[in-house]
Amino acid sequence: MSGPDLSVKIGAMAMNNPVMVASGIFGYGDEFRGLADYGELGALVLKTITREPRLGNPPACRTAETPAGIVNAIGLENVGLDAFLAEKLPAAMEYETNIVASIAGETPEEFADCARALDQTEVAAIELNISCPNVKKGGMAFGVDPEASAEVVAAVRAAAAKPIVAKLTPNVTDISSVAVACETAGADGVSLTNTFSAMVVDVERRCPLLAAGMGGLSGPAIRPAAVYRVYQVAQAVAIPVVGMGGIWNANDALEFILAGASAVAVGTVLYADPAAGNRVLAGIREYLDRHGLAKVSELVGSVSIPHTSG
Amino acid sequence: MSGPDLSVKIGAMAMNNPVMVASGIFGYGDEFRGLADYGELGALVLKTITREPRLGNPPACRTAETPAGIVNAIGLENVGLDAFLAEKLPAAMEYETNIVASIAGETPEEFADCARALDQTEVAAIELNISCPNVKKGGMAFGVDPEASAEVVAAVRAAAAKPIVAKLTPNVTDISSVAVACETAGADGVSLTNTFSAMVVDVERRCPLLAAGMGGLSGPAIRPAAVYRVYQVAQAVAIPVVGMGGIWNANDALEFILAGASAVAVGTVLYADPAAGNRVLAGIREYLDRHGLAKVSELVGSVSIPHTSG
Amino acid sequence: MPGSQGRKPGGGTDARRASAEVLGSERLPGDHQRLLLKAPQVARQAAPGQFVHIWCHPPDEIGRPPGSALLRRPYSISRLRPPDGVEILLRVRGIGGRILSQIPKGRLLDVIGPLGNGFRIRQSMRTAVIVAGGIGLAPVPFMIQALSSRLARVVLLAGAASDGKLPYRVEREPDKPASLPVLASLGAEVEFVSETVEGTLVSDLLEQRLDALDPDSDEVMAIGPRAMLKRLAAITEGRFSLQVSLEERMACGLGACRSCVVPAANGAGYKTVCRDGPVFYAHEVDWERLQP
Amino acid sequence: MPGSQGRKPGGGTDARRASAEVLGSERLPGDHQRLLLKAPQVARQAAPGQFVHIWCHPPDEIGRPPGSALLRRPYSISRLRPPDGVEILLRVRGIGGRILSQIPKGRLLDVIGPLGNGFRIRQSMRTAVIVAGGIGLAPVPFMIQALSSRLARVVLLAGAASDGKLPYRVEREPDKPASLPVLASLGAEVEFVSETVEGTLVSDLLEQRLDALDPDSDEVMAIGPRAMLKRLAAITEGRFSLQVSLEERMACGLGACRSCVVPAANGAGYKTVCRDGPVFYAHEVDWERLQP
Ligand SMILES: Cc1cc2nc3c(=O)[nH]c(=O)nc-3n(C[C@H](O)[C@H](O)[C@H](O)COP(=O)(O)OP(=O)(O)OC[C@H]3O[C@@H](n4cnc5c(N)ncnc54)[C@H](O)[C@@H]3O)c2cc1C
Ligand SMILES: Cc1cc2nc3c(=O)[nH]c(=O)nc-3n(C[C@H](O)[C@H](O)[C@H](O)COP(=O)(O)OP(=O)(O)OC[C@H]3O[C@@H](n4cnc5c(N)ncnc54)[C@H](O)[C@@H]3O)c2cc1C
Ligand SMILES: Cc1cc2nc3c(=O)[nH]c(=O)nc-3n(C[C@H](O)[C@H](O)[C@H](O)COP(=O)(O)O)c2cc1C
Ligand SMILES: Cc1cc2nc3c(=O)[nH]c(=O)nc-3n(C[C@H](O)[C@H](O)[C@H](O)COP(=O)(O)O)c2cc1C
Ligand code: FES
Ligand code: FES
């Protein structure tokens, strides 16, 4: 199809268009097969894996609805690196687009071990889920600390040649400093935001609704908070930014792009509309046509915040 | 009316019930007069004032809608301390309940000056809006830094005998540490959360929708994130916590109470339903009756998060 | 609870808030919808130029937060239908308007109003010249209703981008200015221009007539796009008293939240559209600093 | 856009997703609603015990996030109405159910299904004993439809807290067990007990009959509250093959998100209700660790 140039590069990963699927939403890619043409999208990020398999949080319940959002406490349940390589990745690779693996660990070494193995595969890039707990720091997430984040990125950088994207948590005072630390340590891109820490109380039963107690808020509710964080990070780093958090339609995606995202990812919306990524992509195309723009890259980061202040 | 005991104390401020109106929503109290029986509520917090009058952010536009939320960038427009004392406070004092003044400043001294003057008035308590920019730290909010927050609280504590409530911003890595610093510095209570930093982009005009560029997200969208922060803070401090952020109905308010809030405040909801505070109060009463509880205080902080983790 | 009946919303004690029954809802050309509400509290107290603040969802669902249209929507009072009917005329653009336009007859709407300050009618006034552009025509019927009963003469100069954008039928006869018969029948001399047919702006119409007006007894009242209002302010400055009705995004609608401010003249800070306005004397507004 | 017609949602390429027309919607006792959907893709492929995942809002509004019911809602397939009708039976409790129960005939619903694994019918099976409690009765008509055409005998043991909680009429005649005529007419021997009238639990009914059943050819299929299922698992353990249908909160409904997991027997991690289930053999589930 001719039309505007939608291509985007993150390090060596070339994407036909800026629409990705966010990690975790989509499992290992196979379960949604057939519900939309996922191969049409720029990249698909698979569920975060860890070196060892993990059971995740206790069930009953793991996901709750909140106004225009959901709170999940899946807790990184995953099959582990070996089963991922043997069973899950080959199936995902059947999609004719970039497949991105997402990894987490409790130490930089665990990240590096996963990355080393993935470097031998066909994955287009590796996303680092640094929102997970850092055992050295008593379970505080790596991603809330620029140094710990940089350590993870550096360890992975040393272990793998593939493009690396660091996925940032919004639960920090200064997300830009984390982004800059990741860039300096060698990340090819950053993606944000992961979920906002959150809690839902079952008032009738007088206990947390999620078995894990707390979880992460995603969906349209967080969009304006996520857009602002993308804006802040895009001001601070030179590497591409992948924006996400509540994208529901093309207008939302364009908010992220105008705020500074080179690419965007759809997440929670896929539970309502499995074809949302394609819908968003079509809408971005339509917008570019309507505004007579030849390239999506012309839009990236084109808004700015006035320097006056009240 | 007999029925459950709803009373709450924050320092020396005794409230008949735990439902407050949040700062800023309600102006100086007079504008909403007649749209509900505000005197029935536990306390009314007036709009934040500063020592000098302030114009706030540029207009067109200052408030935007987002999914289940709004983003505002009013920017502390206010009449200043003198006009507040002369004109606004006397009108507000006509409500037959606790009137709380909210103050902000660019230095601890500005806070202290306001507090000193307010200490001579009939206000029941003083709320410190420490989400405002700290000129000494290049405009970073006081509230993101435990030490700067403590400095403000200590300065006000030295200047005023009235109960002091420190209002916390959620835009930090570790809100509990800020709460603890405020408690140690002499606060009688903490209230949270203020708004989440956020941005809305006008995609057609390709600029920020809010004239100020960024603003603060409030409303139901933030509720689960606010409840979790209240939970965290209530675990960390012994002083009463005022919970707010997206309360729309009694169930929402009870989530905050069960998570650890001794009192709650309604904010954004008043723009839809000016009588929401009264509706919430009635619902809390009904809940206590239905559950056979004699006191609302029995509920405060009665949920806990399991210590298992996936 | 669909189609539920008449619970008074929220226990408000203020006569300004009520559940108003939708007595009629009619689609009009140009994506307009006319709603007729049974709102005695509004009908009794309203002045032309005032507005109502409407919760777009069912009143009995106010305890559940909606995903969109969380805030009320301001709409001018378009016309009174005595004894207690109030019409609003909305152009469907965004989500709130769409929801309202789909509410069937018989349902209830949670309405606060009348709010704000309407157009002032000075004692000495004889002729009112209403200048209205586009959706600015919404409150014009009510203005004519109120003015024509008290003044010697009411002139309406109306403009639109094209005839099709209007909710009213345009009457064009040879050698006569185009008219809007529905509005003329309420008691105004009407002249209408469309940018596509006549190629004239409504502000030009006023300019042509200015010399024939008497600054002591005649007054211009304007409502429409900012660009039009700015132009009128420039034309009339120092010569005629001009009242303008402004729009801004609102939250409270009551003057409390300071969402809807516009710059006041003489550096006097900001004024709220919802409470100080929506109608201002042109000299109260700082037109330089007013955003387009 | 109300009452809009048949746009295929989202350009999905999967036969499992379609806009299904609501052919009928009927209020039933006990706050139940029966919806009849025109869903050929479901009707063609469905097995009893499978479910559909429904977006509660208009299909053409899927591009706008709702404030509540952001996730789809899982409902069992209650009955097939050939050639392409699919019934669901819902008990209105929360917001999603309320929205669905109010959708008028003629509107469209965005439905994904059939999803999950239904009840298995072994080759050697002769008698199926269905044990159903409360809203567990929803898929029972479809189960009877499918089983009675292939097995010698279908027995339904049904229970509820009280008669009034049921969507069906209860028939009580002297000296006979209470029955549910609508379900009996589909080809099952029915015995019904209500806790308030008979004072018996449906699990007791099964217990009384167990000795008369043949483990090789007879099978128990159960659906209802967890407590009931737990009891049945205990009663049948090691003696009879038991299939149970479980419920959990879902997000994707497709096995991807791991929201809806239940503990698997023998420490084999978790299984998803949406994809591995909702029907499991009792021996696949770790009943100890299963939350009440
Ligand atoms: C005093 C006053 C009187 C008005 N009278 C009329 C009238 O009689 N008929 C009519 O059709 N319109 C009128 N408007 C404009 C009307 O309020 C907006 O069209 C309406 O709020 C748009 O809501 P929406 O959900 O349909 O659009 P959206 O674009 O979805 O609204 C998004 C947000 O922006 C706000 N907004 C969007 N456009 C405007 C606007 N022009 N003015 C103020 N807020 C806006 C909305 O209230 C909402 O908060 C009036 C506005 C004001 C301030
Ligand atoms: C496989 C399966 C089949 C089902 N079949 C039927 C049926 O045929 N008829 C029927 O009436 N109900 C059935 N249910 C239960 C039905 O899905 C819930 O009643 C419904 O999701 C409640 O949504 P709500 O918005 O009305 O309630 P709310 O309480 O407002 O829902 C809040 C959230 O909790 C979830 N939730 C609440 N209760 C349940 C539940 N029991 N199971 C799963 N999720 C829940 C909702 O999906 C939603 O995400 C089934 C559930 C499952 C898992
Ligand atoms: C159920 C669920 C599971 C998730 N799992 C992961 C995960 O494994 N790894 C990860 O980096 N992010 C995970 N996320 C976060 C999303 O990738 C995304 O960052 C977040 O949901 C915000 O985007 P959204 O609002 O569009 O969903 C998960 C989100 C949800 C809702
Ligand atoms: C329009 C608006 C103005 C506000 N002004 C103030 C303010 O002046 N001082 C303050 O401490 N908080 C202010 N807030 C924050 C609220 O008091 C409250 O903390 C926040 O909105 C979260 O609660 P809510 O989601 O119920 O609105 C304001 C919020 C809004 C929406
Ligand atoms: S809308 Fe709140 S002051 Fe005008
Ligand atoms: S609902 Fe997603 S795995 Fe079952």
Image (cartoon, coloured by chain):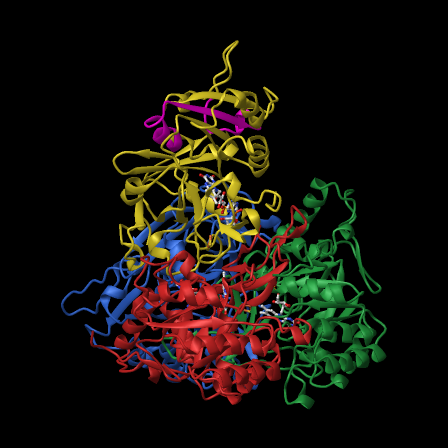
Chain colours: A green, B red, C yellow, D blue
Query: How many numbered marks are there?
Result: 0
Image location (x, y in percent) of residue A99 = 75, 65
Q: In the rendered image of this protein, does residue B146 appear above or below residue B244?
A: below
Q: Position of residue B206 (x, y in %)?
A: 68, 49
Q: Nearer the viewer, residue A111 or D209?
A: A111
In the depicted structure, whether residue C225 falls above or below residue A73: above
Q: Toward which corner of the image does residue A120 lie, by quadrant?
A: bottom right
Q: Which residue is rendered at x = 40% and y = 48% of the image?
A: C53
The x and y percentages for residue D10 are: 59, 50
Whether residue B116 sits left or right of residue D155 in the image: it is: right
B297 falls in the magenta region: no
Residue at point 46%, 55% (across, down): C70
Residue drawn 56% across and 21% down?
Answer: C208
Residue at the extreme top: C175
Asked if residue B116 can be seen in this view, the reply is yes
Relative image position of residue B222 (x, y in whole percent):
51, 67
Q: Is residue D281 left or right of residue D207?
A: right
Q: Nearer the viewer, residue B287 or B138?
A: B138
Residue at the left extreme of this rendering: D174
Which span is picked out in magenta? C142-169
Comparing C185 with B234, the one in front is C185
Residue C150 is a magenta residue? yes
Picture quarter with the C terminus of chain A = bottom right
Q: Quadrant of the N terminus of chain A?
A: top right
Whether residue D219 appears in this view of the structure is no
Comparing A232 with C58, the one in front is A232
